[in-house]
Image (spheres, grey):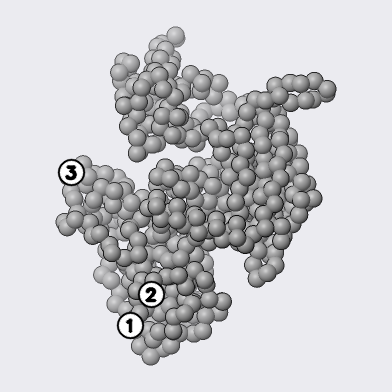
Amino acid sequence: MTDFLMPSLGADMESGKLVQWLVKPGSAVKKGDVIAVVETHKGAFEIDIFEDGVVSELCASEGDELPVGAVLAYLANPGEEAKPLAKATEVLPAPGAAPREAAAGMPKETICPEKKVADTAGLAPAARLSVTVPAPRAKVSPAARRRARALGIDPDTLQGTGIEGSVTLADVELAAAKGIRAKAPFPTEPAVRRRGFDPTEMRQAIAAAMSKSKREIPHFYMSSTIDMSRPLAWLEAFNERTPEERLLPAVLLLKATALALREHPRFNGFWKDGRFQPADDIHVGWAIALRGGGLIAPAIHEVDKLSLQHLMAALRDLVARARGGGIRGSEMMDPTCTVTSLGDRGAQSVLGVIYPPQVAILGFGRVLTRPWVTGGNVVARALITASLAADHRASDGHAGGLFLAAIDRILQEPETL
Amino acid sequence: MTEADIRKLACELLSDIAPDTDPASLSGDKDIREGLDIDSMDFLNFVIALTKRTGIALPEKDYPKLVTLDGIVAYVAREAQPSG
């Protein structure tokens, strides 16, 4: 039996609201299936499951605001019998992990006392009561839910036309066009947070995570100027095709960074339990600015193994989902190193703040045509400033310099990317 | 396709990309990237959508001509004429 817990979708998340179950007791699930939608201050996320099994019991109800680590459901593993556990008298197992400091700051009333909470500091283990499974209701995509909220429509009352009758963005827009509104004014929740994306809360969450980073991580910073003429000339030739097949320069930067991380694994992983723990794979967190303000940096998985075309597709998909809803929980948890690229309207350089528990963040400024010396002559070249902020507990400047040099070297051979 | 049609289409596609903005209220000579706060991914998505709707190729080297609404209208109107 496995506990399915409220995931931590980043160092800045303390609690989340279970918006919707997409499974019910008895549902067979496979690793990677989306089984719930959880809403945080950064919006709604699709939560996928990490192993195969059968849902034996849902412990949390839709609408519950729960701390990170709270048990949401029980999962019977293959071979186990998927029947509900004994009710009422069962007492929590001791939490396996150290209590999270995140939960300590939670107002107590936000944690339902009858709910089983696995890992919250300062809270006595509570006896678990049986939980009524809510009546099935229409599935609603996160994007549709967000849009509906903005329009003052209750998406759960709509007739869905999506897969298995799910309510899609189009259904919401249609309802809005018909003038449908929520029956009652949308409930203003006295609870810990308003529903969905809230710029003020996102600012606070970023402040909390970045303060933790600056407080705990001894950052060091380095930067190098990289001549982008070769990679951009290669890209210009490559992009003489239909717009759909074109690549953005960001894709070259991402791939080069991932390949350089392969050579310099000490920048790819986590600082945990007082030591550096290298990651097995290279999942690059890509910082995406949200239109309402704030940013998120979900992972693109195994960037070093993706072709440029696949990477472009992954990037396009990720940006669309980050802005429209539908980022998966695992994508928020997986980054092993982060890249922030300012794009063509950004500043010349950026010195990042490491996102704990990662140990490095790469920053790329805007490509600018500036003077460059080559062969004793000053020439105008397209240049980019690449910067590294890294955790001095895990590495030092010598390694950092080699890492930046590797990115430069790899970028100069764009045809091999 | 009249110039008014092209402008209307461009505004429609841009508001899909930047849903919180009103492209039609943007001055025709203003840089849409600045005015609507769109990044290079948004711009590429706009180019893809515009190509799909007009059938015009919009090569990358012509992007600088497409950064204002007036520029887009002039470019599409010119390219849409048979054998220019």
User: Is residue A317 placed above or below A336 in the rendered structure?
Assistant: above
Does the rendering let one see residue A246?
A: no
> Based on the displayed image, in which of its 4 quarters is residue A343 positioned?
top right
Query: Which residue carries the number 3 mark?
Result: A178
Most foreground residue, A67 or A108? A108
> Based on the displayed image, in which of its 4 quarters is residue A227 positioned?
top right
User: Is residue A75 placed above or below A287 in the rendered structure?
Assistant: below
Alpha carbon of mark 1 to alpha carbon of mark 2: how far?
21 Å
Judge from the rendering whether residue A361 lies leftward or rightward of residue A92; answer left or right: right
Residue drawn at (74%, 21%) of the image? A379
Judge from the rendering whether residue A44 lies leftward or rightward of residue A213; answer left or right: left
User: Is residue A232 placed above or below A84 in the rendered structure?
Assistant: above
Q: Position of residue A180 (x, y in %)?
A: 18, 48
Q: Are marks 1 and 2 on the same chain?
A: yes
- Count residues near mark 3 (Cα–Cα under 10 Å), then give few for <14, some for 14-19, many for 20+: few
- Which label number is shown at residue A149? none
Is tag 1's residue or tag 2's residue first in the polypeptide sequence? 2
Q: Amino acid at mark 1?
A: Ser
* Residue extending farthest top: B84
Quadrant of the frame with the C terminus of chain A: top right
Element carrying mark 3: loop
Query: Which residue carries the number 2 mark?
Result: A108
Most foreground residue, A313 or A38? A38
Residue drawn at (56%, 48%) of the image? A286
Judge from the rendering whether residue A24 lies leftward or rightward of residue A159; answer left or right: right
